[in-house]
Image (cartoon, helix red, strand yellow):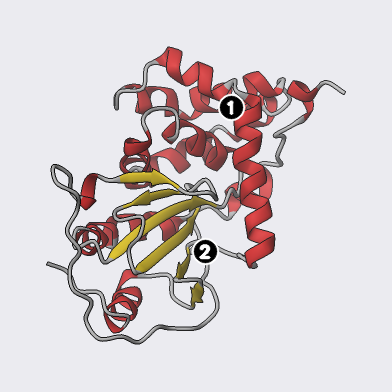
Amino acid sequence: MNTARTVLKFSFAAPLALALAACGGGADGELESDAIEAIAAPDGTNWGETVTVSDEDGYILGNPDAPLKLIEYASHTCGACANFSQTGKPSIKEYVATGVVSFEQRNLVRDPIDLTIATLVRCGADANVQALSDQAWGNFNEIMGAAQANGAQLEIANELPGDQRLGEFARITGLTEFFAARGLSRAQQSACLADVETIETIRTNSSTQAEELNILATPTFILNGRKLDVNQWRDLEPILQRAGARSE
């Protein structure tokens, strides 16, 4: 079997048709606690710039030992995720700065463009993953519009060998130019988008975790192991506060 030719193929029709829809929520369960005192970062550091990679291949912003661990399963082609990135993420960073809350971003891969962006945001430094993701979500309509407008070209590109496919997706949708303008050279991008093993790991982690945790939609939020039945910041923030979080 030619692995480079056979892995990572998707159908474009259904996922991209759903890309502009709100994408759902999770289960139930909340935590109750008195206010938790702020936790100082180690000397010379601050929690807002501290990034670690979890065992589940998520990117944790903040204190990795925070008493409140918030996880988001997100898709780069989910309109509700884009909305949360713009409306909730700035406030999340205020909670992260206290050391009481950490925020971990994990992938739930929905379609080829999602996988392409997930690969590109990981292409540079770990510290830049969430920032690049937020910038991509901030340009959600432009990116998805390009994908929708070039569906026929994307279907053709979908037949390319696996080590060429995502690079062509990026070119067709303007993602190559988008990320080049944000510090990822074309050579970096080409290498990352041809790394079939790493790309397949992203997709496999997504599908395995979705099955194990029953993640059915994006964004799905998990707080200290409990799935939350919310997908907007206005509903999530009160849960964090009842759990003991306070922003500075």
Please give the residue where the numbered disc 1 appears in the rendered image: 166
Q: Position of residue 132 (x, y in %)?
A: 34, 38
Type of amino acid under label 1: Leu
Type of amino acid under label 2: Cys
- The kind of secondary structure element at disc 1 is helix
Displayed quadrant of residue 152: top right
Q: For the N terminus, which image quadrant?
A: top right
Between the C-alphas of marks 1 and 2, the distance is 24 Å
What is the number of callouts on the image?
2
Q: What residue is drawn where x is 19% and y is 53%?
A: 41
Q: What residue is drawn where x is 45% and y is 34%?
A: 122
Dots 1 and 2: beta carbons under 8 Å?
Answer: no
- The kind of secondary structure element at disc 2 is loop
Residue lying furthest top? 187
Q: Is residue 8 left or right of residue 142?
A: right
Q: Position of residue 102 (x, y in %)?
A: 33, 60
Eyeballing the image, is 121 above or below 17?
above
Residue 23, label in figure: 2
Q: Position of residue 50 (x, y in %)?
A: 27, 46
